[in-house]
Structure formats: C-alpha cells, structure tokens
Image (spheres, helix red, strand yellow):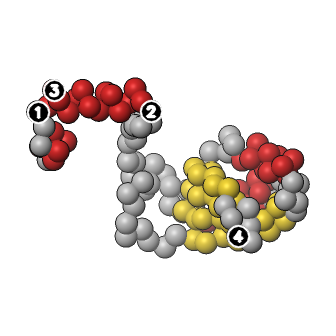
Amino acid sequence: MELSERVGLSPSATLRRVQDLERKGVIKGYRAVLDNQQMGVGFVAYVSIGLASHSKHAQLGFEEHVRFVDQVVECHNITGSNEYLLRVETQDLAAYKAFHADVLGECEHVKAITTMVVMDTPKDER
C-alpha cells in the first residue's frame, strides 16, 4: 500500500508533507534492508563492553577505536554494569574470533567483553 493511501491524502499532498518533514530533520534519511546471507554475513552478535575506567578519555578512546571497524554496525553507550553495547556482524564464528582478539582485545580501554550470539531474528523493524 502506498503511503498516500495509508494516510488518506493525495500523492502530491503526501509528497509535500514528507519533504517538509525532511527539511525539518524529522526524517533523517532512508535505508535499504539487506539480506545478511547474500552480503556474506553468517554471524551476528551483540557484544557488551565494560571499560577499565569510567572517564571521558576512556569512552572517547574506545569510540575512536571502533568507529571505523566494518564489523561494528552499531555502537551504543548504555547504562548498567557495562558502558557499551555493540552489534557485530561477521562472515562466521572464526571471523568473529579474530575480531574479538584483534580489535576488542587490543583496545587498552576494554576491561570486559560479553558476547551474546544471535540465533534467530523473529522481528527486526530497524
């Protein structure tokens, strides 16, 4: 069903409203939903990261360490016992193991790493 039909407006009125929302920054962008298997991603995990220090220096250092790492597709600063939650996507378990050792294990600010492997995704509306 087209957006204009869903909201009960003409296509031109719907387009004007969407463009207005884009200009105001309410709509920040659009995304394509990719098939992980076809993209070569066979392993997905959420990784909880505890830092050795709660300082701003440690946070900025960790964020800079993972900012350009392709396997880290999301990085969230969270509350609770750890400081960060990452969504990590790799080709397979062996590739994740290398990422774990070579990327996370080499970051001086990381004190604790907890990996939660995604077994299935019955709902994903990101």
Residue 21 or residue 103, whichever sits in front: 21
Label drawn at residue 12: 3
Q: Say few, some or many: other residues with alpha carbon within 10 Å of mark 1 (under 14 / 14 to 19 / 20 or more).
A: few
Q: CA distance from mark 4 to mark 3?
A: 47 Å
Location of mark 2 (residue): 25
| Residue 83 relative to residue 31: left or right | right
| Mark with earlier residue (3, 2) | 3
The answer to whether mark 1 and mark 3 are in CB contact below 8 A is yes
Q: Say few, some or many: other residues with alpha carbon within 10 Å of mark 2 (under 14 / 14 to 19 / 20 or more).
A: few
| Residue 40 relative to residue 71: left or right | left
Q: CA distance from mark 1 to mark 3?
A: 5 Å
Residue drawn at 69 percent across, 43 percent down = 67
Residue drawn at 42 percent across, 54 percent down = 126
Mark 1: amino acid: Ser
Location of mark 1 (residue): 10
Q: Say few, some or many: other residues with alpha carbon within 10 Å of mark 4 (under 14 / 14 to 19 / 20 or more).
A: few
Label 1 secondary element: loop
Residue 101 or residue 120, whichever sits in front: 120
Q: CA distance from mark 4 to mark 1?
A: 47 Å
Mark 3: amino acid: Ser
